[in-house]
Amino acid sequence: MKATIGLILVALVLGITTALWAGERFIDNGDGTVTDTQQGLMWAATDNHGDIDWHQAEKWVQYTFPLTLPVQYGNWRLPRLAELHSLSQSDAGDGYEAECGQRLKLTPIIRLSCGWVWSADGDAVAPTAYVFNFDNVYHYSVRKAHRRGYRALAVRNLDGE
């Protein structure tokens, strides 16, 4: 078991190093995660695949998503608005169509089932939070209890913070 985890970690490090030399920004790690070499972040390769409110989204990224991975990484969290915006592609030819029918302006290596993603920005005790919209590339505030169309996407810092 330790040897398998060690081999996976060596492969991940070699893949990231090779990609950095090649100038690639996003690397599919092959384990349900994507590394963003420019931002120093590791993203979930997909969202939670269903409507979710903000409180459920927080729990999903911290507790449910990590259990789906073959290697256990720590410090998963909801992304900040600036981090979500960094994934957007404003060129009309870029992006893809999500399962919900939206045309998402998002790097295609990360697959969302719908284009509204909860963020960590905002006051933790406030009744509202921010959602980033990958269809129109903007953010807005919505009540944390709303769930229709909203998704959770996990992210973690590569430096362990």
Image: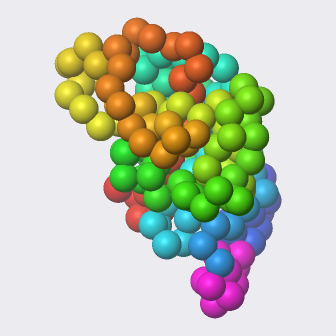
Q: Nearer the viewer, residue 161 or 112?
A: 112
Residue 7 in the image: x percent, y percent?
A: 76, 67
Q: Residue at x 45, y 38 (%)?
A: 132
In what quadrant of the picture does the C terminus appear? bottom left
Q: Nearer the viewer, residue 7 or 136?
A: 136
- Res. 92 image quadrant: bottom right
Q: Is residue 93 above or below residue 145?
A: below
* Residue 96 visible, this orientation: yes
Q: Residue at x 45, y 66 (%)?
A: 39
- Res. 131 image quadrant: top left
**Farthest front residue?**
92
Residue 46 in the image: x percent, y percent?
A: 68, 41
Q: Nearer the viewer, residue 62 or 87?
A: 87
Secondary structure of the magenta portion, mostly? helix
Q: Residue at x 49, y 72 (%)?
A: 38
Q: Is residue 112 above or below residue 129?
A: below
**Farthest bottom residue?**
21
